[in-house]
Image: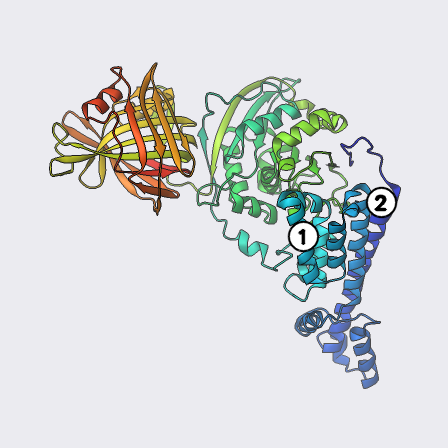
Amino acid sequence: MTPDATPDPTPDPTGDALRDAARELAETADAIRTASVHATAALTGTAPTARRRPGLRAQRALLRAVTNPRGLGAPAGGPLGTLGAKLGGALRAESLAVRVLTTSLRLRIAAVTLSHPELAEGPLLKRLNDAVTEGREIEAARALVALVRDRGAARALTALAPVFGEILALRALRDRSPLNDRTAWLIATGTATATADPLTGLSNRAVAALDVGAGAARRTVLAPDEHLSTDGSLLAFLGDIGVLGPTGRVAIRAVQGPDGTERYVVLVPGMRLGRPDDASPADLLGAFSATVRASGPYSRALGRAVADCVPDGAEIAFVGHSAGGAAALSLAQDAAFCARWTVTHIVAVGSPVDFKQPADPRTWVASITNQHDLIPTLDGQGAGNCFDLHPDWYVVDYTDPSHVFPACHSIEHYTRNLAEDLPEARDAVDARLSPLRGPVTRTHVYQLYDSDGGVTRRATTTHGPVELPVRCDDGYAVTAYFTVRAAGLPDETVTVRGRALVAVHIAEHRRGTLGRFGEASVGVLTRGFGTCLLASAQSTGLAHAVATEVFGQPATEADVRAGGGARWTRAEVDAGGPVLTLAGALGPGVPLAGGTHTVSTLKNGTLTPSCVEERGPRKAHPAPGLRLTAGPDEHPMARHLRELGLDGARPVFCVVARAHRSLRSVPG
């Protein structure tokens, strides 16, 4: 099924006829290429028939058939055929198969243009389309630059999105580079996922091979302001994915169906925002890997989350967005996984999944894509697809008036479309998900990782068990350093001419082992690049329990907030009244590498250490324009700051991490 969110969703018979013709031409081109491979093999002596040594006349006839522009046009297959084809492509000598396939792609573009008339209305789009079709590379580049200048990058991509794959394939077929020919062929014939970048020919699998790891999943908790739904409907599941956000987290929810059977729904959000790293399988590299590979760290980590809480033999449904849908289908391709659990449903929203297939033929699959969303076309197939790749799937490929990319790729946009514009599709999917309509009995949230990352042990607190080391996967942190008089500070304090260095650290952890929370601490620098804590505060009960019971540090609960931009920062601690405020301009900064240091607490005259490993990019700002203000009440942290003479003080330097990541562990 292919509904349309526009007022007139009536299928265009002319468009269907063009797609049928394009499919037939693609099949014809494939057959011609096969004939060319056989003829080339016979000519070069690599085929069994070539051993019969045909006469000179026959060889000449075969050579003419293979190389004559009115015949097959160019050799194909085998080392010599491949070399000849590449030389011919460099000299603009096209084979018959390429000419037929080019015509097929033109018909696909024409079919899409009928349902997207805006593709033919603008002179810049027409100029680009004509230049690509005719193989005029310089003119195509100029037309693309003109389009971007006229509309901006986002709107230019939005305009091209319905025919983006076809334009890339046409360019790859008509340019002089032999490196992208196979990718163009795969896109144009719909036989497999694109194996290389259509522009440069860079191997997709070579890039995806950089995504390594066995996959790992650790239980985490939702932030106090994050709330999941209580029922089992499509819109509720998509809303829950929106709550989880692109943070590398997944949720597994147990639902009691109408028949009393407990079933499980696995909610898998899309790509985590930010630069690729060595921690999350849901980063940009992991999303790319999930598209082009059958298995990767993302799907393996997802499988570990399922194994942790879903009993063997249970029925499981996956609902995934973007790369999450691709990872879910990759996992469902694993026959061993499907033998252990029954995958009943997969709903992939905005996901590149055209060339994935569940191992269990009973699995019901729905694919929902916006034709102006570029992400589902990363496997090479988009709105112009003329092949019925999955006749047993429920396919919703639609368009809507507010379709600017990348906004149209967001889970919120898809949810709104299904709620307001696609009632038929929503009801059809909900009808198939009816066994999952019922109360949610329990929910487990997991943070996914590329690899295990060295869980050393598990600790028990009054707020529940936690895994060590305590991990922050994304946050904001600022540490300001002040000079104070060393009198009365611990003996291990580093002093210079009677002065010591005090570190005031405030961080807001957006996700990690302990969920979302804020923390603040005041400590003095000790020998061995360590910090002895004098006071600390945490914003959640679990974080406070870990601080006092696991790390043994002096701590209270308080509201902690931290954030800022490239040139400023602001951090606050409040416990029924202001405790501290650190705010102002940062000034110039220099990059600072991550490092490891010791955080200790003084208990009965003995320092109890823990190890903190800082990761991710940081910047050091010498002489920043920050000012610290201590609160007037008797809160332990405010009192320490006043006793140290820091009320109204300016730091000598500070370190800011806008994408803070860290590990904190205890010895033993």
Q: Is residue 300 visible?
A: yes
Identity of the amino acid at label 1? Answer: Ala
**Residue drawn 39% across the image and 43% down it:** 616
**Tag 2 residue:** 15
Q: Nearer the viewer, mark 1 or mark 2?
A: 1
Residue at x-position 74% and y-position 79%:
51
Q: How is the image coloured?
A: rainbow
Locate residue 36 relative to residue 531 in the image: left or right: right
The amino acid pointed to by label 2 is Gly
Expressed as whole percent of the image width and height from the top left, the position of residue 68 reads 81, 75
The answer to whether residue 185 is visible is: no
Question: How many labels sit on residues?
Answer: 2
Label ID, residue 146:
1
Mark 1, residues whose alpha carbon is within 10 Å: few (<14), some, or many (≥20)?
some
Q: Residues within 10 Å of mark 2 (few under 14, many from 20)?
A: many
- Tell me if 174 is positioned left or right of 464 in this view: right
Which residue sits furthest bottom? 56
Quarter the N terminus occupies:
top right
Q: In this view of the protein, which residue sits in the foreground, 27 or 474?
A: 474
